[in-house]
Image (cartoon, rainbow, N blue to C red):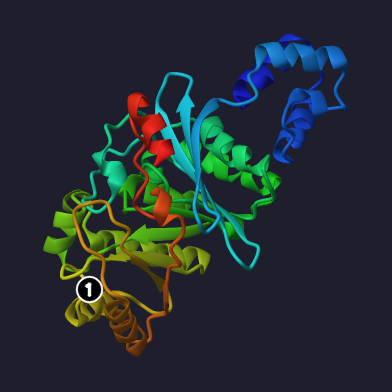
Amino acid sequence: MDLELLERTLADRGQPAYRFRQVWEWVARGAPSYDEMTTLPRDLRAALAGEVPFSTLVPETERESRDGTVKTLFRTSDGHAVEAVLMRYRDERRSLCLSSQSGCPLTCTFCATGTMRFGRNLTASEILDQALHFRRREAVDHAVYMGMGEPFLNYDAVLASARRLPDLGITHRRTTISTVGWMPGLCRFVDEVTEPVRLAISVHAADPELRSRLMPVNDRYPLDEVLAECRRYFGLRRRKVFVEYVLLAGVNDSRADARLLAALLDPRVFKVNLIPYNPTGLFEGSSRAEIERFKSVLEGARIPATVRLTRGRDIEAACGQLAAPARGTAAATAAR
């Protein structure tokens, strides 16, 4: 829902300020339409239905994985493609992977989103509407800004949307914003965000030359500068930073790579999340044995490390696989 449009519409109609809060509370609880908002006068509900669309996004296709993961392709009002994912876990967690941009301009080589043509930043309402789409389906309790786009290239909208997620049942401590290390946004986050939103940094290689090949952003904002800012964050907020590291066979998964990464990280500040590579066509994923060897090197250096549980790979919904098709191919993609 376009919350700015909602606020203007209510004000233009001379409605008291609390009406906005009433509408938002219904929406955040998962109401599927204005009809269910029984605390609002009937004529106001009818007027809002005609003037403020219930969502800024139109679901175009939806696919469900064998493991219960759901991926939805949306279109914005001006036709841009956006994908978001609901991940269901056996321990009853319901986690959302949210997109902050249509496409991504940063072209990381292992990420399918980088192969899309970049569209634009999403508004805070468009980001929230991804979450609300799934909230209308079932209760949700975790969110990660790890979908399409670099969140800190859209800093204001991302933070505005994150600050409303607790109303949906997703606390700040269960919200994670992932960045490649876009320094202008990272510095603002360190200085400004006092809520306990989690910070994750995409590293993927400790060697500067290799990281620049995998992630061209490293030429602009080198890893040592990014990690220094993370250490400043820990000093100010006393919150650990999560390091994301996707393992590519024969590229960044050797013991030497693990030792180099361990040498960069202070175990008091960082925790590593190792990510099995989800195929996008350019690389091969490391074997389970290689992943365990890499993890053991980190743990031997007292760096906390976990291996991410892959969800939704069979529907291209796993980490690094989001790449919305053009309009003409959406139906074919949904049918696969």
Residue 154 x/y as whole percent: 41, 38
Residue 207 shows in this picture: yes
- In this image, 239 relative to 303: left or right? right
* Vertical comparison of 295 with 41: above or below: below
* Vertical comparison of 72 with 266: above or below: above
Question: Which residue shows up at 32% across the image and 50% down it?
Answer: 183
The kind of residue on which mark 1 rests is: Asp
Question: Which residue shows up at 35% across the image and 49% down it?
Answer: 321
- Residue placed most toward the observer, 91 or 315: 315
Residue 196 shows in this picture: no
Q: Tag count in the figure?
A: 1
Residue 218 x/y as whole percent: 20, 54
- In this image, 2 relative to 268: left or right? right
Work out which quarter of the rendered image holds the C terminus and state it.
top left
**Corner quadrant of residue 228:** bottom left
Residue 209 x/y as whole percent: 11, 62
- In this image, 320 relative to 258: left or right? right
Residue 260 x/y as whole percent: 21, 77
Question: Which residue shows up at 42% across the image and 79% down it?
Answer: 304
* Vertical comparison of 334 with 219: above or below: above
**Which residue appears farthest toward the left when viewing the image?**
209
Q: Which residue is mark 1?
A: 253
**Which residue appears farthest toward the bottom when viewing the image?**
300
- Residue placed most toward the observer, 197 or 309: 309
Mark 1 Cα shell of 10 Å, populated few (<14), some (14-19), many (≥20): many
User: What element does badge 1 sit on?
Assistant: loop
- Residue placed most toward the observer, 243 or 160: 243
* Vertical comparison of 121 with 248: above or below: above
**Corner quadrant of residue 199:** bottom left
- Residue placed most toward the observer, 250 or 252: 250
**Corner quadrant of residue 89:** bottom right
